[in-house]
Image (cartoon, helix red, strand yellow):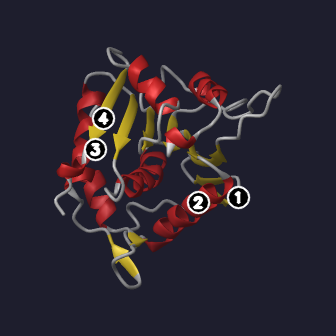
Amino acid sequence: MKFPLENFTKFCAGLSIPAKDHSGLFRMGALYSTQRYFCQELAAGLEHGVHDFLVLKGRQQGLTTICDALDLYWPQKYEGLQGMMVADDDDSREVRRDIIRQMYYSMSDEAFRLPVRVDNGNMLAWANGSRLLWSQSSTKTKGAKTKLGRGRGLSYLHADEFDAWTDPGAVMGLRASRSDRHPRRLYTWASTAQGHGVLWAAWREHEHSPTTRRIFIPAWRHDL
């Protein structure tokens, strides 16, 4: 499978986002070098049959933003996808949901903007049968099993600030809910490092994995 890099870059150029260094909404325009490197790594992985990506990143690299854009692009481009955006807590989920919705409604190019069927606190769904579910990684509770991913057959996943997740069972639940056959499946687990948590464990586990590509994006890759 080839990653539609040129088409995705054009899609991003039409999105408006809130930015801390600019007044009002900021048009994405040209991607940062860190964002371009991330997309190139996705393309390289997909071309070799890899659909699962573990991303270790620094702060202020634009990686959350590019993943937000991918949350909008992938389900609209490929019909019938069931995707999920998973934040580390309730507050982060609501912020990401609002930003992604804001990005969607800022698009002026109708070629990239499909009609919405459902837009609520549970999901954003389009006329092509695809949907993006909103969720968060529940805090581990003694004696309780996680419900994350239960009853959900996923072909797209954006696991945000993955290393802040406190329940390893949530990771296992999501992995079990993923399709391993869908031709357009895409799963990203991205985070800054926060100690010897779930990201550290996953990074070591997939050091030689033929099905998961590890992406490290250090500070020096940023063109600012």
Label 2 or label 3, whichever comes before in sequence order: 3
Check disc 2 and report the residue beneath it: 97
Crowding at mark 3 (Cα within 10 Å: few <14, some 14-19, many 20+): many
Label 1 or label 3, whichever comes before in sequence order: 3
Distance from disc 4 to disc 3, alpha carbons, whole Å, reads 8 Å
Q: Are marks 1 and 2 in contact (CB under 8 Å)?
A: yes
Residue 121 - label: 1
Distance from disc 2 to disc 3, alpha carbons, whole Å, reads 22 Å
Crowding at mark 1 (Cα within 10 Å: few <14, some 14-19, many 20+): few
Label 4 or label 1, whichever comes before in sequence order: 1
Distance from disc 2 to disc 4, alpha carbons, whole Å, reads 25 Å
Label 2 or label 4, whichever comes before in sequence order: 2
- Does residue 19 appear to the left or right of 224 in the view shown? right
Three-letter code, disc 2: Arg
**Is residue 207 shown to the viewer in this render?**
yes
Q: Residue at x 81, y 28 (%)?
A: 144
Q: Could you say which quadrant of the image residue 112 lies in?
A: bottom left
Q: Are marks 1 and 3 in contact (CB under 8 Å)?
A: no
Q: Residue at x 31, y 56 (%)?
A: 61
Helix, strand or loop for disc 4: strand
Q: Are marks 2 and 3 in contact (CB under 8 Å)?
A: no
